[in-house]
Image (tube, rainbow, N blue to C red):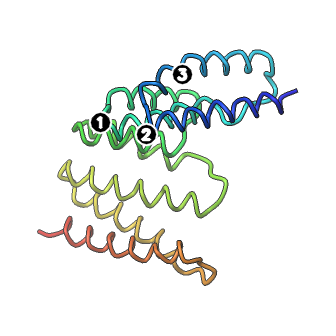
Amino acid sequence: DALPISELALLYQTRLEDLASAAPERAQALLPDLERFHRDAARRWRDRPVEPGLPQAYMTLALSLYGDGEADKALTLAESSVAIEPTPSALDLIGTISHKRGKLDVAASAFDRIFELGFDNAGERLHWEIAAHLELAAIETAKKDAVAGRRHLKAALRHLNGVLQYPQLDAGQRGRRHERGQVYFASAMWTKP
């Protein structure tokens, strides 16, 4: 039955998260066992995906390593995650690392892929699309293409304004007004002659 396997996967993921925050080197040591577990589960239950999956495990460790300054290892894990299942967090990390390294085309490609993903809800989609447009605006500006940079800033602002029009916003969502101010500020800074 897949339920006990999913429970075991959750235990592995919880252990990985605990180790990733406290002892990333021990979390890395757990990764081969976790990969073997997922390979075996996929072979035994082909019609039932085990959740949380291997992409989530890769990203847990990738984000921890990136936070510890291990960008090369983080990038490799994020790319492994995307190879199995592209997620916005993995693409964002690939784009961020590539942008910081001056690989602007690779970064832009990663952020562009976020627009192709399916999302469970509109709020999540808008959050990631706003973030991707802001990153793409910075990349285009670094490439000296102010017109493309402004286009992405306008798209981010349009999405953000759409989110803020909903009267049912909770306190966390209302905090996005601060994000709107940041977009305006960025727009003013990046579009100066």
The image position of residue 103, as x and y in percent, is: 26, 36
Residue at (59, 78) in percent of width and height = 169
Residue placed farthest to the right in the image?
A: 1
Question: What is the secondary structure assignment of the residue under circle 1?
Answer: loop
N-term mark: 2 or 3:
3
Classify 10 Å Cα crowding around label 2: few (below 14), some (14-19), many (20 and above). many
N-term mark: 2 or 1:
2
Residue at (79, 21) in percent of width and height = 46
Residue placed farthest to the bottom in the image?
A: 167
Q: Is residue 8 above or below residue 150?
A: above
* Residue named by callout 3: 30
N-term mark: 1 or 3:
3
What is the three-letter code of the residue carrying label 3? Leu
Question: What is the secondary structure assignment of the residue under circle 2?
Answer: helix
* Residue named by callout 1: 69
Residue at (30, 57) in percent of width and height = 137
Task: Quarter of the image for the C terminus: give it.
Answer: bottom left
